[in-house]
Image (spheres, coloured by chain):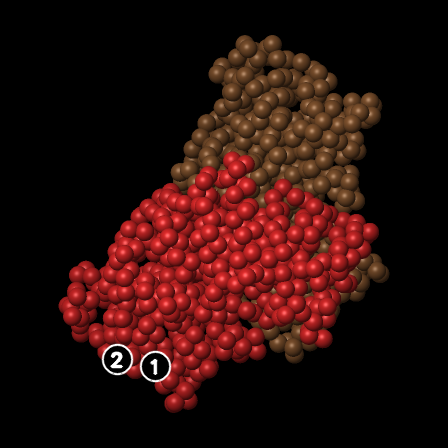
Chain colours: A brown, B red
Amino acid sequence: MIEQRIRNRAYFDKIMNSDQAALLIKDGMTVGMSGFTRSGDAKIVPLALAERVMKSGEELKINLFTGASIGDEVDGILAEAGIVNKRLPFQNERKMRNKINQGELLFIDQHLSHTAEQVRNGFLPPIDVALIEIVAITEEGYIIPTTSVGNSSIFAELASQIILELNVAQPLGLEGLHDIYEPGMRGKRQPIPLTSVEQRIGTPYIAIDPEKVVAVVITEKSDSTSAIKAPDAETEVMAGHLIDFFDQEVKQGRLPYNLAPLQSGIGSVANAVLHGFLKSDCTDLEVYSEVLQDAVFDLMDAGKVKFASACSITLSPERAAEVIPNIDKYRDKIVLRPQEISNHPEIIRRLGLIGINTAIECDIYGNVNSTHIMGSNMMNGIGGSGDFARNALLGIFVTKSTAKDGKISSIVPFVSHIDHTEHDVDIIVTEQGLADLRGLAPRERAKVVINNCAHPLYKDALLDYYNEALKRGGHTPHLLEDALAWHARYLQTGSML
Amino acid sequence: MIEQRIRNRAYFDKIMNSDQAALLIKDGMTVGMSGFTRSGDAKIVPLALAERVMKSGEELKINLFTGASIGDEVDGILAEAGIVNKRLPFQNERKMRNKINQGELLFIDQHLSHTAEQVRNGFLPPIDVALIEIVAITEEGYIIPTTSVGNSSIFAELASQIILELNVAQPLGLEGLHDIYEPGMRGKRQPIPLTSVEQRIGTPYIAIDPEKVVAVVITEKSDSTSAIKAPDAETEVMAGHLIDFFDQEVKQGRLPYNLAPLQSGIGSVANAVLHGFLKSDCTDLEVYSEVLQDAVFDLMDAGKVKFASACSITLSPERAAEVIPNIDKYRDKIVLRPQEISNHPEIIRRLGLIGINTAIECDIYGNVNSTHIMGSNMMNGIGGSGDFARNALLGIFVTKSTAKDGKISSIVPFVSHIDHTEHDVDIIVTEQGLADLRGLAPRERAKVVINNCAHPLYKDALLDYYNEALKRGGHTPHLLEDALAWHARYLQTGSML
């Protein structure tokens, strides 16, 4: 049985248990781990490491680089054990987030397409150990990733040592789904030859030097499943606004009947909005995204999406139970790429994607905060939203118009942190409506954002702010002494009202 | 003589004077004009139009799209005449800026690589008239641009009508310098084949449909020259910091001896910093930029720069008088491309540029404001700084640590407008020092920015703000009620102190 998975005999000598493998990770090391949006992460070696350190009390700190978020259990216990010095480029686990916001753990929030470049150029500490979950080892000794590619290929290529977690709970049907392409050093590389969503440009395996592999650990621990919420009445309305908008764009001849390849960010709102296409007349849709959530599989099953490219698959428990064991069924409809390729500006711009990402808050001029609560506290990270919004045909941000039972307005005079500037935001959608900002100057944008997207509870206050600012003039009129007053009020009183 | 310049006989019938040509531009039209950083702009037709309207008092408003800034005289009189409805994607003329900030003229501030895409996709009003300065017309009826390419090729391709300003003051030696490449529609295009700075991938002319040309106007009006100031003691110190940094990068093996292709933004500081390479040991440098200012020609003459690619040439009066008439001398060392190519994320990322751009202000976490004075008033525009900073190997921002005789600190707790987020800013340089932000989390960044870059006048106040914010915690600690207080104080008292 295991011979099906380990097809190169030399690797059998490297099999050990997770405790033994965890001993190979030493204090001060930088560990590059597989895992993107909770999928395909190495699981039992980091758990063994954290548990040992918590028991022994030994001094051990590592830098932890991943693709994006890893399973809650893993990031949680690593945070709890206090063994992470620096974490990048994304996370979304509560305990780790708290440590970050308390300053006990340093987090670097990066565009997900940037990490590989920075590692390659030596702008980050070198990868001592790559810790990669795999589904199989080929005869040549190359490795097959599981449900995500993330940064696994660049970590494995550049690491001094490699530890493999061979996960027998991940179906062998995943083999053949991946397309690994290494662009090479900036300044010496060729164009990335990808010109269509379904095209394969690389290899179905990560080619590694087998000599670097120091441990193979067998596991059968499943991926964490996604915690996204089902679409609700408000997200359905938001999806409706967007479908109406696309209908208009098709009618005006600005988009073809099957639109353009869709990207949708991680999370409930983006998933719900994508879900809205089930009710649309669209067919032959394509997806070129970083993560495939439930909605994409629902759309494939409904015959709406004909092909989906991403760097990970992250599903709800129900959909994971259906999809993952039967992944063969989607073999001719899916490709998984390194995140550097799924999120590459070159490809996003060339393919002309429609990028749909979630905002925490937007200001009246169209600047977007994707990461921080009230300016100071990190939520999850910018993820790929910047890679996509900047380079997409249409950079779309979705958010409910209020949060915390109306105590927070998601449309504010001035966002408390900016991740996407007015230059990169084409469309804002809330349950109140859609603001099409293309070709609008700031003074035009403000009116459209307030009138179309703000909640009635806050609309007058936003108009008051804007009209008062207008009296002072400016290209982007502001009252700097009041610009962040809504946030300050919330922090003091628990409400922006 | 004119036959040397107009080699297709059909064009002779289209020659008219500027007043006649100006009559072809009607109320409500969108005009796509040549011109980038004051160079290669159409000059006498817009002047004739503005003068006529000012005299006649007729009702006439146009949308004016260009490459970037055009000559002061032209933007100035167009603003004065009140005939511009919308202006994009960049400007830097005083009268126009005032109108923008007074809300009398709508300005859309765009990434310079985005405009062509938005026109191509019909997200902006269609181009009614392209108004292009040229140096010659080929036998086929194609046109040769002058000292800039800007957006001329996409405007000419998509416009309903074309008006040509044949400028006999621009030397015929410019012919052969241009390389016009049209990527085509997003979703249907191939990789842009450019893999090195000096490579030519297109044609030396803009291929147009001669039938669309409705007027050829002969002119001999020179380009506006640049108003950049000579390097001063402070900019020399800044250049020194940067040269030292590059030396270290070479020593550490992160950059080769000739660094990476350099990009430098428009303006005195960026030009001065580039000038600093004259005193360095660097040789075989390459430039891949949007504009070639004095410093690049000085570096070429000194044998430091071996090749320079850009989309325009903008020089001081002295250097213009030396360089432009003798442009033949640089024929094998220069190529001028459309701004979509000079600023394309695909190329910038592939070549691994070093991008050096000017900031108006930076915050302690590394967010950069490139466009707005005290949050509300537009200065010039983001230009290409975002195209470069986001996609470069190194995104570098330079600014003097204070402005207005010390009354403004360029390092602030929270920038009053954000154009470049912490995710895109690698290095900040002031005359005080250099902050290398690579691989640093926000709490690390704050210390480095304050300690290395802030002026002593403001250092303590910045540290106080940061330390007070630290008490409240957060990934990016802020005191939102005080975050913009420095700017508000300046607006009230005329000083941040």
One can see residue A55 in this view: yes
Q: Position of residue A145 (x, y in %)?
A: 56, 26
Which one is nearer the viewer's eye here, B223 or A155? B223
Q: Is residue A388 visible?
A: no
Residue bearing mark 2: B17
Image quarter (top left, top right, bottom left or bottom right) of the C terminus of chain A: bottom right
Q: Position of residue B69 (x, y in %)?
A: 44, 68
A138 and A300: which is toward the camera: A138
Inter-mark Cα distance, 2 to 1 = 9 Å
Q: Residue furthest bottom?
A: B56
Check disc 1 and report the residue beneath it: B48
Task: Name above or below for residue B16 compared with residue A105.
Answer: below
Chain of the residue displaying label 1? B
Q: What is the quadrant of the N terminus of chain A in the image?
A: top right
The image's mark for residue A198 is: none
Which secondary structure lies at badge 2? loop
Task: Kindly identify the residue that appears in the image at 42 percent across and 85 percent down.
Answer: B59
Left of A264 or right of it: where is A81? right
Task: Name the residue: 21% across, 74% down.
Answer: B14
Q: Residue at left 52%, top 61%?
A: B269
User: Image height check: is A338 above or below A285?
Assistant: above
| Disc 1 residue type (three-letter) | Ala
* Mark 2–mark 1 CB contact (< 8 Å): yes
Which type of secondary structure does the marked residue at label 1 adopt?
A: helix
Quadrant of the rendered image containing residue B322: bottom left
Chain of the residue on which disc 2 is drawn: B
On the image, which quarter does residue A56 sit in? top right
Q: Residue at x 70, y 46 (%)?
A: B444
Residue B123 percent coordinates (x, y)? 46, 61
